[in-house]
Image: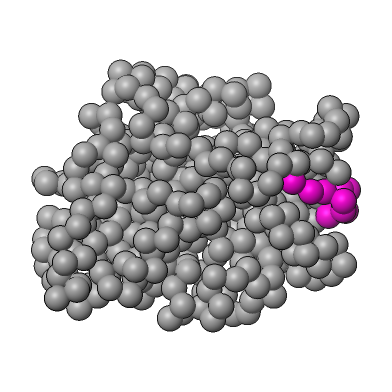
Amino acid sequence: MAMERDQEKVLDYPIPAPSALEPPQEWERLRSGCPVARVTLPSGDEAALVTRYEDVKRLLADPRFSRRLTGAGAARIAANESGGVFSSEMAASVPDGGEGHRRWRREVGTWFTAKRMTALRPGIRDMAEGLIDGMVETGAPADLKAHLGFPLPVWVICDLLGVPESDRDRFSYWSDALLNLTRYTEEEVSAAQEEFFAYMSGHIERRRSDPGDDLLSALITGTTEDGAKLTDGELVGTGMGLLVAGHETTANMIGKMVAMLLSDRSRWERLVEDRSLVRTAVEEALRFDADSGIGLPRFVTEDTELGGETVPAGTTVMCAMAAANRDTGEFADAGEMVLDRAPNRHIAFGAGAHSCLGQALARTELQVVLEVLLDRLPTLELAVPAGDLERVDGLAVGGLATVPVRW
């Protein structure tokens, strides 16, 4: 009966947390007593929420269910009428499933191999070194997010796509307009999407006539295994999607990772003493992140059993990866940040056919940033108490407003 009473409660989602680096206290109650909860999204629409590791991973990996929220009866996530990035033209321009999606992932995925990531590391390190030089010159205290976290991923993804560095500030606005669930009006979101679409269409045309050594040029001039080319819509959607995903998610994660490590300075000091832990520390930061955002939606197209309950067809389900990554049924000492945790089967990048295509790039950027900071600023510390850090409100991917540091 307790579970039935829990299921009658409708929670506002995202669920508030005690502080920027702590998880909502509600997560544990939901995992143990209400595996499929009813929530109200920023749009006012209702959805289901799953928080258990097994349920989240299974739903994300199930090819029957769509990441797009364009079907009849699908919930809108954002407060504006468009419903946000999950209902946008950008999301619809890339194949969502079947052979079309597999073909698209094969073509784009060749640019995110381990070999390519190794080749990118020196350039990413040079970028990080230069940005840290600028931060040190400005002097402490400084906002690590503004000086390093946000610029670096934009520079990397601009370079990967052959986009001029001078345009990166425009991408910051466009991606924020598409990913923020509450800040912008319907008119502002539509205008940003149209401007972004027009820019990327023009960039692809320029690359078609003057190809370079970048991902979009390769996709434009190359052919797929069956001799076909990606359509213009797929090319534009790929460029827009990679810029948005490659900018906001990694930019925010850099700030959160450093804040998590500095919030208990013994973590930072351990890494200063033992750089061999950098790789596992990055993975643990991804798992331990209590503010990864709203999670990933799935539109359930047929009756499905989750957590011992039947979720009816036509339900929009929010998959809370951050909650799943704190599931004590999957992770020993789930509430502790264990820098040498292995294995670490976190699902911060999703699961299955729609797992994050750029996760190798994100891992590379996070590892390089951490290595450079440890080398250059071993005395780094937070300039404010960890409890005073503030989250960015309304952003689909979750982040800190600022990360004040000194050294």
Q: State the image coordinates of residue 119 (x, y, percent, origin top left).
A: 74, 54
Q: State the image coordinates of residue 221 (x, y, percent, origin top left).
A: 51, 40
Q: Which residues are magenta?
A: 374-382
Residue 227 seen in this snapshot: no
Q: Is residue 393 left or right of residue 138?
A: left
Could you tell me which quadrant the C terminus lies in? top right
Residue for point 78% across, 64% down: 266
Residue for point 51% across, 78% down: 331
Quadrant housing residue 299: bottom left
Quadrant housing residue 327: bottom left
Q: Is residue 330 left or right of residue 45?
A: right
Could you tell me which quadrant the N terminus lies in? bottom left
Question: In the picture shown, does residue 93 fall above or below 3?
Answer: above
Q: Is residue 159 left or right of residue 17?
A: right
Residue for point 75% across, 64% down: 267
Q: Nearer the viewer, residue 284 or 161?
A: 284
Q: State the image coordinates of residue 72 (x, y, percent, origin top left).
A: 11, 45
Residue 345 seen in this snapshot: yes
